[in-house]
Amino acid sequence: MKPNRKPKLATVVNTFELSANMQRVILQGEDFKPLQATDLGGYIKLMFHPEGHTDISNLREGERPVMRTYTISELDLDSGQIAVDFVIHEVDEKHKIISKEQGGYAIHWAMNAKVGDTISIGGPGYSQLIDLNAEQVFMVADMTAIPAITEKLNKLEQNAVGHVVVQLSSPQDSPNWNLPVGMQLHTVIGHQPTELSDAVTQLSIDSQDVAIWCACEFTAMKAIRTHFNNQDAIQREKSYFSSYWKQGVTEDGHKVIKREDAENLS
Ligand SMILES: Cc1cc2nc3c(=O)[nH]c(=O)nc-3n(C[C@H](O)[C@H](O)[C@H](O)COP(=O)(O)OP(=O)(O)OC[C@H]3O[C@@H](n4cnc5c(N)ncnc54)[C@H](O)[C@@H]3O)c2cc1C
């Protein structure tokens, strides 16, 4: 479903460090009150002026806001509040936060947001469901997909069986999940996308009926998708592979690469 196009105006009502490498920003807006409980885990578009600030009222004729995609990680319909969790773009040990020259409209905004700041938001759109009737589930996420995968994990039946592979920037980023006993958790600590794909490709699948949900960095997603597509047991209609970002490329460039990748697949 296409996200609702009319931007919603949101005001920052709180911001705090959720974990070592994740900043939570709580946004409030009357426009969020008519949302549905099912919008939890859906994606939204944060809108920025090309100059980096969030006042898009004075865009020039034909100029479009810069969009950044995030997930609704908590939703309170009564107060019209949503929580958005921003992963800090760790570049390397020395450069904790990406420089402005390297991009990062969203992360720079989130790290500097103050109560009372406003931002326009598009959406929400729905994130892909996982087939809960499959014999096994295999779920993969890096930190950008933790808000989305958490919502999916919360929907699993208590007798669900399978694997969850999650990549974290540090052990202090561990999400507070209460998994069904049949779900094995595999945690990968590190920043390199290949560390996640290597961990996934080492695991074997012992069922003919597996639902796969995978959202992470582009290169890792492609390696994981190729791995699964090479296995006969995998059913395409029960598989979802999505890249949430691409190393070294802003979201605008990533969108183009994503489109090309989808065209090459079909
Ligand atoms: C459906 C969907 C839902 C998403 N939900 C979330 C979410 O809830 N939380 C979240 O944090 N992200 C989420 N993302 C990912 C987010 O949209 C991207 O990380 C986005 O590029 C961030 O925008 P930016 O302006 O900060 O950086 P950009 O200007 O897009 O990129 C600047 C530079 O930062 C690098 N970069 C971008 N993201 C990361 C990262 N995570 N780690 C290291 N380097 C990075 C880029 O490669 C580029 O070099 C989601 C993406 C999708 C498609």
Image: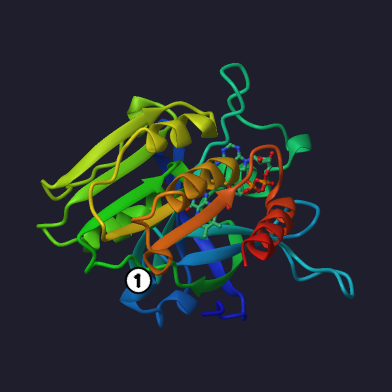
Residue 131 visible in the snapshot: yes
What type is the residue that disc 1 sits on?
Ser
What is the total number of numbered labels drawn onto the structure image?
Answer: 1
Image side of residue 70 versus residue 42, left or right = right
Residue at the extreme right of the image, as rendered: 61
Q: Secondary structure at mark 1?
A: loop
Please say whether residue 14 is visible from this viewpoint. no
Position of residue 77 measured from the top left corner of the image (x, y, whole percent)? 34, 74
Residue at coordinates 34% horizontally, 28% vertically from top-left?
A: 172
Measured along the vertical axis of the image, is residue 24 above or below residue 35?
above
Q: Quadrant of residue 73?
A: bottom left
For the point 50% across and 73% down, the residue is 125
Q: Where does label 1 land, which residue?
A: 79
Query: Which residue ends up furthest to the front in the rendered image?
Result: 232
Near mark 1 (Cα within 10 A), the count class, few <14, some 14-19 or many ≥20, is few
Q: Is residue 253 above or below residue 157?
A: above
* In the displayed structure image, the side of residue 206 where residue 9 appears, left or right: right
In this rendering, would 132 be left or right of 107? Answer: left
